Amino acid sequence: MQPRTLLEALECSFTGKLRAIYDVLDGNNKPRPARKDQLVSAINRILLNRVKAEWNSLSKHEKQVVQEAVHDPMGQFDVDKFTAMHGKGPGKRFTVSRYNNSNTATKLNLFLHLGERHDPRIWIPEDLQQSMKGFVPKPKEPEVRFLTELPPTVDLVSYPYVYKSGKYVRGATSTTVPIEWRNMEATAKAGLLSVLGLIDEGKISVSASTKRPSQASMNRIAGALDGGDFYASAEAEAEVGPIQAFAWPLLVQAGRLAKLDGSRLELTAAGRKALSAPSHETLKMIWNRWLPTKIIDEFSRIEAIKGQTRGRGKSAMRAAEWRRSAIDEALARCPHRGVVSVDGLARFMIAANLGFEVTRSPGTLYVDDPHYGRLYGESATRWGVLQDRYLLCFLFEYVATLGFIDVAFVPPDGARKKPWEPTGYFEGSYLSRYDGLKFFRLTALGAYCLDVVDQYEPETPRKSTPVSVYPDLRIVVQDGRLDQEERSLLRSCADEEEPDSVWRLSTEKMLKAVETGMDTGTVREFLSARDEQPLPELVEGFLSRIESRARAIRPAGSGVLFECDNVQTVETLLSDSKIAKFSSSAGEKGIFVKTSSEQSFRNAARKMGFGFDNG
């Protein structure tokens, strides 16, 4: 807790530290007071009388340190936050440890002190804080640092143990590798429609309990993605595993575009509507529904870290919604089109108080060995391996898949420092498949979906592929190739007769599309924009008939069909005026009764002397 006065803070310090503080404050005034109470009184009197002069004597870096404490609402100085923002700590010689009777001090020790006996936090006393607010300027707000250009390569540094002179020693090795860059905005819009199309064809299976896709389904999705998954080669795919192909089925389920039917996904009404709706609106809707979803905790994808799913480890895991919310806010403050390093985003989140917890008890998690591999060195509240790997997974597997960021990455092997080495029990070359993510860039789609901008303007304007529409309902591509969005719309209302070139409007598909929310005007507008000639009259007539007949039949309730033993029983029952109100004949010996009136029918029939065979 923040000390109320400087005097109170000084009284909690060791005598050796007080002597050092006195020497920094008034070293030329000899002799130094001998007793602790005299030291406390002298330091308190001198500093409060000339606090502004002492502030002015600080170096630029020291002033930045004091600024943070003076303008913190609680008067606290957070070393981690300051280091993340400025790239270095308050200084090697600056210490305030209660358990170290240090005889050294810097000018920062005049302003920053410990609080209560068991409180390890660093504070500026309240009276000192209030007196300095008038002349100490506010510190700069944290900003996301960015590059204007992406470096073509990165150096991967590893520290393997080598045998030398009869003992093992650490030897650094450096490898320069090229960076792969993926533009994800167009890829995500096309990927959404491809996945919805595969679901519509019944080709995506998921687990009924975990909602995760099968390996065969992920292979189909990866094959349908523009450019394949992030690590597209067969060798890399086998080692790293799917990323986009894993995320898409979960994303569309969380977005309520698909639901489980047996072992396969099927499109919901919203999913069918999304086939012809603007993709950017659908992706924004998915994001808003993903943030609070409980369909998965993304950290479970860091399979090398064990202990997440049972016992104390499971109960200690924090809700993923809070982590997503923190990253969502951080991404919204990233510069549009600026290249940001993942480590740079992490430092910004720490500096901007956007940190998050993965678990309340890191010691319940482990790598490889449940005894020796425990992550006791981790902290629940400070940024470490757990927060780092969650951020990498969330950005690479979900934010990038949705097209909100372009990504730059290298193979994960050796891409990040091995923070698990102190355990001595992890032999792998990387901790997660996401370790290779190095940089990202917020896209126009991301800026829109994160509410940074109000209007969406694609980075690459769409070009309409010219087609010719014929009276026999054929649609022939004249020049070029339909993009994924164009193909998706045609797939919802027409049959593909020749690959990538000839389609024919289908009555069945059109009716199905209109039933699930698509407007025939959308199809008319789509075709008119791509055909230089007016639409043929037969095509206009086809669309008009679809409009008039699309809702010709509607459900009027459900019912129960009863079969009687003979025609005379049917006639006798239907002759009753009460039964006739909610029943009708159905075939020679059948009676159809509305579900809501089934019990009334049974009661009336029994009164007439007829019983029921419930076999």
Image (spheres, rainbow, N blue to C red):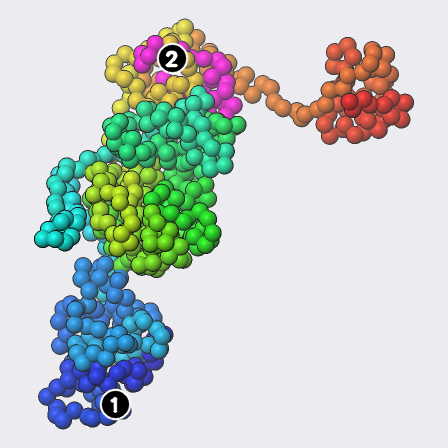
Q: Is residue 73 above or below residue 207?
A: below
Nearer-the-camera pick, 183 or 79: 79
Q: Secondary structure at mark 2?
A: strand
User: Exactly how many numbered labels are in the figure?
Assistant: 2
Q: Position of residue 522 (x, y in %)?
A: 41, 23
Quadrant in which the N terminus is drawn: bottom left
Nearer to us of marks 2 and 1 is 1
Q: Secondary structure at mark 1?
A: helix
Residue at 32% over, 57% down: 378
Q: Is residue 167 above or below residue 573?
A: below
Residue at 81% over, 26% down: 601
Residue at 23% over, 80% down: 101
Image: magenta residue range: 498-527
**Disc 2 to disc 1, C-alpha distance:** 91 Å
Q: Position of residue 416 (x, y in %)?
A: 22, 46
Does the rendering let one see residue 468? no
Which residue has dot 1 on it? 36
Does the rendering let one see residue 369? yes
Q: Which mark is residue 403?
A: none
Amino acid type of disc 1? Lys
Q: Position of residue 18 (x, y in %)?
A: 22, 84
Which residue has dot 2 on it? 496
Residue 504 drawn in magenta = yes
Q: Is residue 481 above or below residue 284?
A: above
